[in-house]
Amino acid sequence: MTLTVFFSAPAVWEEYRDLLPGLLAEAGIDARVVTEASDPAVVDYIIYAPSAPLQDFTPFTRCKAVLSLWAGVERIVGNQTLTQPLCRMVDNGLTEGMVEWVVGHALRHHLGMDRHIVNPGHVWDATCPPLARERKVAMLGMGALGTACARALAALNFNVVGWSRTEKTTPGIQAFHGEAGLEAALRGADIVVTLLPKTPETENILNAARLSWLKPGAFILNPGRGPLIDDAALLAALDSGQIGHATLDVFRIEPLPQDHPFWSHPRVTVTPHIAADTRATGAAKVLVENIRRSEAGEPLLHLVDRARGY
């Protein structure tokens, strides 16, 4: 029987138009890929992006799984009409992009590169930075992305500690978990990277009290989710000097409104949600593998736990 795969993310269809059918055929999967579901009851799989128009999954009575193109699923996981299994996107290209962004900006702040790159006064500042092993980096979130970034920074000799909501072990990385472990991870940190999912438990996890635990002048990197940081508390900490600089890739509202104070703050760098983008060449292989696994009766990859929210 020919499978029907509904590609419901029109904004990125051109990237997958030729790639996806070819990979399905190479995998021996007899499938047709459609961009309109005139009869939802015959759809076997939905390829989805949370920004897509599709919001009501009720008519898709035969659908075996919803395969998201995004790593984050907070916009869809609470949808009451979604009763099908939901898989988030995890692929090597996305992970590599995140590692490059985190390592690049961590080194930028560690080495104080801004003062040389942007130096209109031609100031001869020969301040020597400490070595990486003298910098404590707190990685909040030790999932696939956080673990990859933590390992890359540790390979450069940064003193990396990892924190997660539940206990996790990563060789070579000192691990903390739970509420009690959060202060231990943050206390005295020079650099904090936030790579947690957005859940009720993680929203505003970096508030005024927790920002005060960091080493004065610490750097914040947030490529995870905008609501992980209390915006007002961060601005106050930047103004006081408790936080030396914040490099932010994600925000509560995107695109970031033109009148938001982050744009004009001298100690904030705004990047437009580019830290880890889904690249079609890698993502299509993940989609096809999950369809193959489902048809073979094997467990799906990257299945979302609805109770945990990711």
Image (spheres, rainbow, N blue to C red):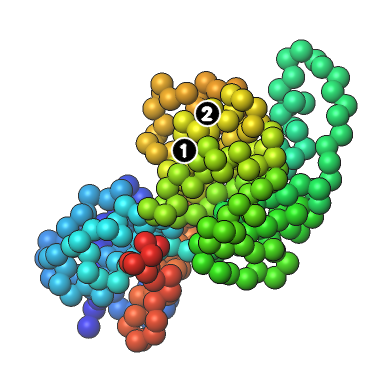
- Residue at 58%, 69% in the rendered image: 168
- Residue at 86%, 29% in the rendered image: 127
Q: Residues within 10 Å of mark 1 (few under 14, many from 20)?
A: some
Image quadrant where one finds the C terminus: bottom left
- Residue at 22%, 83% in the rendered image: 1
Q: Secondary structure at mark 2?
A: helix
282 horizontally vs 69: left or right: right
63 shown above or below 236: below
Three-letter amino acid code at the position of disc 2: Leu
Q: Position of residue 237 (x, y in %)?
A: 58, 30
269 shown above or below 4: above
Task: Work out whether residue 133 or residue 216 is closer to the camera in this orientation and state it.
Answer: 216
Residue occupied by mark 1:
230
167 shown above or below 70: below
Q: Residues within 10 Å of mark 2 (few under 14, many from 20)?
A: some
Q: Secondary structure at mark 1?
A: loop
Residue 172 image-quadrant placement: bottom right
Q: Position of residue 230 (x, y in %)?
A: 46, 38
279 horizontally vs 295: left or right: right
Q: Earlier in the sequence, mark 1 or mark 2?
A: 1
241 shown above or below 305: above
Alpha carbon separation for disc pair 1 and 2: 9 Å
222 horizontally vs 49: left or right: right
Tags 1 and 2 in contact by the CB under 8 Å rule?
A: no
Task: Work out whether residue 199 or residue 115 is closer to the camera in this orientation and state it.
Answer: 199
Residue 80 image-quadrant placement: bottom left
- How many numbered marks does the figure carry? 2
- Residue at 42%, 48% in the rendered image: 203
Q: Position of residue 92 (x, y in %)?
A: 55, 63
Whether residue 23 is visible here, answered yes or no, is: no
Residue occupied by mark 2:
235
